Image (cartoon, rainbow, N blue to C red):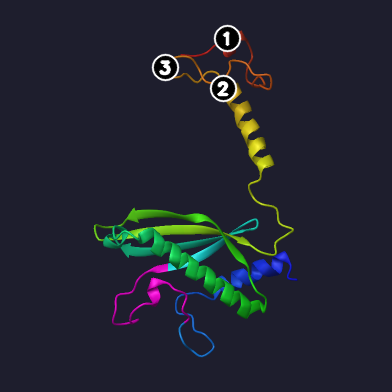
Amino acid sequence: MATTLEIIRGISQAAANGYDGALDDNGDPIQIGLKREEGHAIKDSRVMDGFSVKFHGDILKVCYHGEVKLKEVYAGDFEDSIAQTIGEIAKFLKKEYKKVTGNTLTLTKVGDPDLIVQETSRVRVWVQANCDYKIGGLSDVEPVCDEAGEEKLDSAVRKWLGTNGNIKRSSGGTYGKDKHSGAKTPKNVSGKRDLEPRS
């Protein structure tokens, strides 16, 4: 059974082996499923795209970025094609992980991909997408966002809002309370005049 560190190192090495221009053992270009692999390397115009990975606890975030034509965005199946590309990247990572470590990698898709499309010109746009995968075999890793952390953050925000009673609403009144049980008097307050609200 591989340790957490060995799994993370194996995934990192598998992702590093997918650089642009990488060759396999036979000297042939490695096929990942990206658009930069299509067409002739010299005769055809090069498409800029690639991928990276990020670790969030037991979640592997597969990130894809690339330059596409605006007409592809409005073709109707743009989100599906990006999701398929991210799926191909995940398949490549599993295959390359097996080559590097000799062990199998289990990646379970969590949710749908998130996409951001930004216009670079009237013809081309820049797309950034990512999708989460749960890494199998990481039993000793805690999830990044757990319910206890959410409750702790919620109570901290509530306490902060309770101390800010001088923020005025546009419709009248103020946010929060004028005095809060956990509020402390600032150190630079020297007299009653410093506590009066200023207009």
- Mark 3: give few (<14), some (14-19) or many (20+) Cα within 10 Å: few
SS for callout 3: loop
Q: Which residue is mark 2?
A: 164
Location of residue 118 with respect to 2 vertically, above or below: above
Q: Residue furthest left?
A: 122
Q: Residue furthest bottom?
A: 26
Q: CA distance from mark 3 to mark 1?
A: 27 Å
Q: Residue furthest top?
A: 192
Location of residue 97 with respect to 194 vertically, above or below: below
In the visual, does 143 lie left or right of 31?
A: right
In the visual, does 35 lie left or right of 95?
A: left
At 46% from the left and 87% from the top, the residue drawn is 28
Q: Which residue is mark 1?
A: 193
Q: Earlier in the sequence, mark 3 or mark 2?
A: 2
Locate residue 145, reporting x and y percent. 63, 47
Q: Earlier in the sequence, mark 3 or mark 1?
A: 3
Q: Which residue is mark 3?
A: 171
Q: Where the N terminus falls, by quadrant?
A: bottom right
Which mark is nearer the camera, 3 or 2? Answer: 3
